[in-house]
Amino acid sequence: MSPSPRDVAEAQARQRFIVITAMRFAGVGLVMLGYAIVKGVIDLPYWVGVVLAVMGFFDVFAMPVFLARRWKAADAARERGRR
């Protein structure tokens, strides 16, 4: 028996939630690593810490929005193709 459209949509939403959550956790990790480098806890150049922290903030705040918009556009295109 094939899954219902509702089951498919719920599974897809669950997968997307996991991806966005993982992206945010990775971003927080990058920010913490960058902060440790900037403070001198990890012996790497200052600029490496700054770059990692900026990339982490990007991952936390911008990437989930980007992914959601991309998925929404793909879903809309798929719906237009069905009609």
Image (tube, helix red, strand yellow):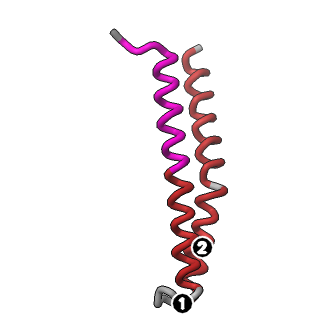
Q: Position of residue 66 (x, y in %)?
A: 63, 49
Q: Secondary structure at mark 2?
A: helix
- Residue 4 sits inside the magenta stretch: yes
Q: Residues within 10 Å of mark 1 (few under 14, many from 20)?
A: few
Q: Position of residue 77 (x, y in %)?
A: 59, 28
- Residue annotated with mark 1: 40
Examine the residues drawn in magenta and state their main secondary structure: helix
Which of pointers 2 and 1 lies earlier in the amino acid sequence? 1
- Residue annotated with mark 2: 53
Q: Name the residue located 55 percent from the left edge and 62 percent from the top edge.
A: 27
Q: Position of residue 79 (x, y in %)?
A: 59, 21
Q: Name the residue located 58 percent from the left edge and 70 percent from the top edge.
A: 31
Asked if residue 76 lies left or right of residue 19, the reply is right
For this rendering, which residue is in front, 14 or 62?
14
Identify the residue at the far left of this view: 1
Q: Residues under labels 2 and 1: Cα distance? A: 14 Å
Q: Name the residue located 62 percent from the left edge and 41 percent from the top edge.
A: 68
Q: From which residue to which does the magenta span run?
A: 2-21
Q: Name the residue located 50 percent from the left edge and 87 percent from the top edge.
A: 41
Q: Amino acid at mark 1?
A: Gly
Depicted 33 relative to depicted 59: above or below: below
Depicted 19 relative to depicted 15: above or below: below
Depicted 31 relative to depicted 19: above or below: below
Depicted 10 relative to depicted 36: above or below: above
